[in-house]
């Protein structure tokens, strides 16, 4: 096809089904001459909610650090792709789609070419307009998502994306590096003498729990760098752990990953983006007592891991971008505390506490959302693969993806569409059932493990 045809006209001609079919392997109708035009632009937008907006789990009182949406627009032969990491805790349902749609329009591309992931700090808002609209139908609803703020901030984000399109720069190589991060991540679940798991949260003051081993984690931070003529243009960092060192006091903060990320950007003068990997069962509790000193040390050590990954980076020439999408239909839980009718009673009860009512609305919204597939995506450049996963997956899914492609560089970002909440292994779910594990805040059934792993295989083209 000629590049004289605009992308919007192309989408109109192909229609939704035709466009979806073309996404299976991008570049299929791009000429060799077009394929040479690889460019990248960066964008940043302040997405801090106003004072009084609900954070996780309390109301915003003061802003310690601004919250950012940071991302890139990639162009290959006239096609554009958007990757974005947002300093929010959770982004669910039509709110997630709203960001993707507005950024797609701003970048003049298709919504299926846009991946939005949360960094998942608990010092940030949970955004779910579907749950908010349910709450607005009941008596004296508790504060949750400010829909006016959501519209305004997504407009600002779209404007930032559009501006970056006007500043696209060529890149000709991709760099990959990784390094072990010292004393940051640790397993949240610590086995006790009786066989029952104990929880080691993001902040842990119990010396016995903190003395327990790190447990099952991915110790490596992975860094991907795009460069032109040897000059680094942007770095993408991937590391799996809950990213908060504190929460619950009404402070907005980009916390440990933001502290390390912005410090490195100031030092290098290279745009830095941080994606949280599959961190459902991983937190900083072994090394964090909730003090400011502990947070500084965690930030220093994560920063050192980033620098080490950069120092180990090796570059290879860029060939072609491949973008793939896979629909994933996850089975929702509908019994017990996930029963829609029971949650509606809680949500509609003006005497119930605000947190319970918000969670009830979110559960109802989730069951409705999961009747439709979630779109997963992957970006491949040469032998570098980036997976964009939904919910809050356990680290097992990240390690599984890497084991499928041991000779390639595989980076994984979790916390995309937030409706499923925790996505756990069948083994972890069984441990909960027989009393050996802690309750899991998962909106989906245990067989979701098999379904998500099958989707990962498909994204990586592994038979």
Image (cartoon, rainbow, N blue to C red):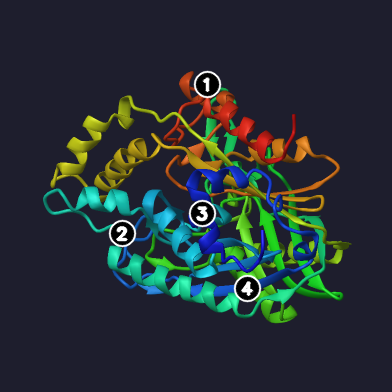
Q: Is residue 164 above or below residue 225?
A: below
> Residue farthest to the left?
139
Question: What is the spatial separation of the Cα atoms under label 1 and label 2, in whole angstroms?
Answer: 34 Å
Give the foreground label among 3 and 1. 3
Mark linked to residue 13: 3
Question: What is the spatial separation of the Cα atoms under label 3 and label 2, in whole angstroms?
Answer: 37 Å
Q: Can residue 86 be seen?
A: no
Q: Residues within 10 Å of mark 1 (few under 14, many from 20)?
A: few
Q: Earlier in the sequence, mark 3 or mark 4?
A: 3
Q: Residues within 10 Å of mark 2 (few under 14, many from 20)?
A: many
Q: Quickly name the residue at label 2.
A: 145
Residue at position x 82%, y 46% in the image: 408
Q: Is residue 314 above or below residue 28?
A: below
Q: Nearer the viewer, residue 67 or 128?
A: 128
Question: What is the spatial separation of the Cα atoms under label 3 and label 4, in whole angstroms?
Answer: 30 Å
Q: Earlier in the sequence, mark 3 or mark 1?
A: 3
**Image x and y of residue 51, in percent:** 32, 72
């Amino acid at each position: 096809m000629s590049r004289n045809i605009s992308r919007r006209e192309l989408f109109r001609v192909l229609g939704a089904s035709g466009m979806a079919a073309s996404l299976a392997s991008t570049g299929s109708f791009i000429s060799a001459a077009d394929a040479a035009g690889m460019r990248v632009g960066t964008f940043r937008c302040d997405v801090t909610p106003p004072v009084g907006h609900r954070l996780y789990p309390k109301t915003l009182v003061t802003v310690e650090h601004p919250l950012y949406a940071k991302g890139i627009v990639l162009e290959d032969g006239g096609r554009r792709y958007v990757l974005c990491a947002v300093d929010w805790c959770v982004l669910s349902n039509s709110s997630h789609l709203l960001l993707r749609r507005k950024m797609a329009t701003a970048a003049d591309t298709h919504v299926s070419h846009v991946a939005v992931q949360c960094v998942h700090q608990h010092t940030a808002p949970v955004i779910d307009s579907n749950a908010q609209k349910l709450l607005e139908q009941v008596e004296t609803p508790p504060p949750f998502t400010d829909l006016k703020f959501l519209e305004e901030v997504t407009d600002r984000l779209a404007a930032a994306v559009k501006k970056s399109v006007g500043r696209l720069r060529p890149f000709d190589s991709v760099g990959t590096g990784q390094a072990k991060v010292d004393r940051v991540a640790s397993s949240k679940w610590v086995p006790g003498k009786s066989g029952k798991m104990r929880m080691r949260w993001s902040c842990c003051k119990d010396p016995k729990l903190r003395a327990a081993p790190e447990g099952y984690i991915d110790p490596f931070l992975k860094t991907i760098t795009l460069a032109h003529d040897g000059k680094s243009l942007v770095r993408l960092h991937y590391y799996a752990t809950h990213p908060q060192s504190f929460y619950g006091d009404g402070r907005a903060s980009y916390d440990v990953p933001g502290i390390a990320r912005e410090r490195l950007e100031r030092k290098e003068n290279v745009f830095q983006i941080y994606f949280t990997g599959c961190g459902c069962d991983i937190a900083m509790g072994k090394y964090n007592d909730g003090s400011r000193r502990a947070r500084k040390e965690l930030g220093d050590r994560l920063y050192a891991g980033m620098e080490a990954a950069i120092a180990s980076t090796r570059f290879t020439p860029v060939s072609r971008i491949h973008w793939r999408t896979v629909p994933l239909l996850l089975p929702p839980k509908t019994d017990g505390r996930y029963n829609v009718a029971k949650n509606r009673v809680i949500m509609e009860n003006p005497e119930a506490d605000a947190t319970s009512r918000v969670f009830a609305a979110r559960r109802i919204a989730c069951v409705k959302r999961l009747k439709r597939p979630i779109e997963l995506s992957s970006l491949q450049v040469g032998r570098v693969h980036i997976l964009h996963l939904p919910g809050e997956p356990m680290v097992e899914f990240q390690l599984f993806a890497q084991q499928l492609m041991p000779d390639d560089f595989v980076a994984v970002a979790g916390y995309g569409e937030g409706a499923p909440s925790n996505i756990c292994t069948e083994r972890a779910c069984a441990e909960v059932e027989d009393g050996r594990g802690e309750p899991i805040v998962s909106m989906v059934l245990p067989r979701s493990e098999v379904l998500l792993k099958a989707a990962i295989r498909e994204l990586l083209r592994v038979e």
